[in-house]
Amino acid sequence: MAFIEQRASRWSDHLNLSGLIAVAILAWSLGVVGCQSPGLVEKSKPVAADPVVRDLLNESRLSEPTRAWLASKGLKQRYREAPEEVVQHLYAELDETSHDAEKLILAELLCDRAAALATAGQIESAMGWYLAVAQITLSSALSPSSTEHGETLLALYNHASGLCGELIFELSHSSSPSSSSSISVPGPLGDYQLSIAPGDDEVVDPSYFDELKVAEYLEIRGYEHREVELGVGGSLVGHRNFRQDQLEKEPFLPDFGMALPVTATLAFDRSDSGHELGGKVELALHDTLVRNTVTLDGIQVNLASDLTAPLALLTTLRPTKNLGVKSMLRPAEYLSKAGIFQLEPYRKDKIPVILVHGLSKTPAVWIPAVNELRADPEIRENFQFLLFRYPSGLPALYCGAMLRHEMARFRNHTEFSDSRGETVLIGKSFGGLVSSLQVRQSGDSLRELFVDRPLAEVPLPESEKEALNHLLHFDSNPDIHRVVFLVTPHQGTDVADKKLATLGSRLIRYPLSLVTDGQVVEVEGMTELARQFVASPPTSVDDLHAHSPILRTVSRLPFSRDLTIHSIVGKVGDGPLSESNDKMVPYWSSHLIEAVSEVVVPCKHGDIAHHPQSVEEIRRILHVHLDEGGTR
């Protein structure tokens, strides 16, 4: 096929102002205009909901209790001049009978000085102070409910652990210490030998990332919920860049990279230091998409995690405005960016869930739903979400062939080839039509729409016949066990018949050779529909015409016998369901009699992917998938 063997070179037409205005109106009329994209902003101060913690981590001034303690001891001026001497004095006063309040003061002073050293660029010195914070607060962090200030001390342990993770990352990128070696870190209350836990299936080596940020400094925007897990450890966001030279090893890494929620813990070797501070300590970065507990000092505790921040970072890294609309209008130009992309490294023990966006959209439309779904521990443990991106101006048959090709490539590259029949496919709107073409048997029905004889007998070059064969002949994918259709126009939509939609379709331009792998001309055996397509290449909007011959034929193709189908439809207004629509797709088109479940969501077409009822239904379906044996 053209998209398999050759990527299209850049090809686009100039769009005049009136054409762009028409497309904007078309997008609005089709319900494809979304809300402001989510993202994040990095702040200079921690974004903490707890006012006590926020006060403690205020770098501009110490908290009232700590200022009062310094004043009572006559140490305010001395702390400014010799902070190390003051913390040593306070630590010397601590014993087994000391209250957590005194420990809290010491931890705050250590954090305050560490922040100043980090700001001054003294990374190793700052790490030593943060390590002291973590060592002093660890026992309280492991049982925070047992003391009055336990929760606050836990927050400081997490804060120090996260910043140590970020600082060791900065240090490793400047001096390249390996995870097999340790580094000496001077501390105010004892020196440390810091080592980094080696990477494995659950722990990430810092060198895997190109950027590592403490999550509590990231302000999230555009998300209904910031999904966080309370527990032990400093929540971070690790980002790995896309690298062209690594494409063979990581072919499903998006061009904006991969962001993971990781949590830093610091484990101290008690046998090495006894009751003194300092000694051996190991920093571990836990991938919280695969691990939610850790054992520290012989106690198993839940890991803290910020699940939203990595997704918000990814959406921030896709700044191209109206990318979905542009790729719809100029599909040849954006074809090289199509494919299946991972949101996390492939896990052989997790079930793939492939999400397919709709007309004029990008995979970003699914990110709010992924955010909500990942908050479910059972879903997070058992499923991995993948995104299919494609230029949605191309006809459904071609987009369907692209997805088949990408799924085959994914299967061949991963250990997923060891198992079949577990994948869940979820398609929205036009993406539902693309998904439908993965789970049906074509037979000769589609071929008969275009030629009146077998393709082998059509007088076309072999390369063109091969390309057409990929479009018109296919089997249902045995890897797909379950499919979810969201507001999918299986029978088309009246909206596509309107004059404005026709104008919009004309603005979608691409050479027919992109689809057919050659300059197809009229030949003997072609039907009238094929001749129309040769004269004017079809678009996705053309496919959406109510009762279009292609959709009518596709809707009659048999589904895979072992497939389970679910449907989520939109409804606006209080009228009868059978006469309703979602402002784009009528119920008579989105309804499927083969579906084992159908949920009606009271929302417009464009809101369906992130509507709470839709997300809850997808959550339910994934749990059903597990209950019915879809587990590895």
Image (cartoon, grey):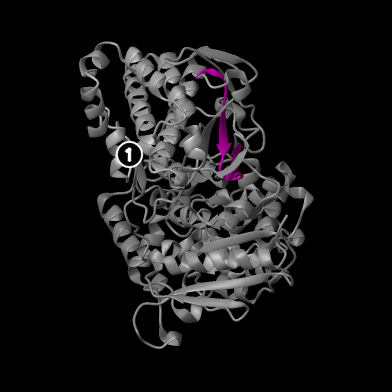
Q: Nearer the viewer, residue 96 or 243?
A: 96
Q: Nearer the viewer, residue 345 or 247?
A: 345
- Residue 286 inside the magenta-drawn segment: yes
Q: Which residues are magenta?
A: 277-295
Residue 502 shows in the view: yes
- Residue 247 inside the magenta-drawn segment: no
Of all residues shown, which one is farthest toward the right?
Answer: 418
Which image quarter holds the C terminus? bottom right
Disc 1: which residue? 53
Q: Is residue 600 above or below residue 228?
A: below
Residue 534 placed where, x, y %? 55, 59
Magenta stretch secondary structure, dominant? strand
Q: Is residue 376 above or below residue 2?
A: below
Of all residues shown, which one is farthest toward the bottom?
Answer: 576
Q: Is residue 216 above or below residue 533?
A: above
Q: Residue at x 70, y 46 (%)?
A: 348
- Residue flagged by tag 1: what amino acid is it? Val
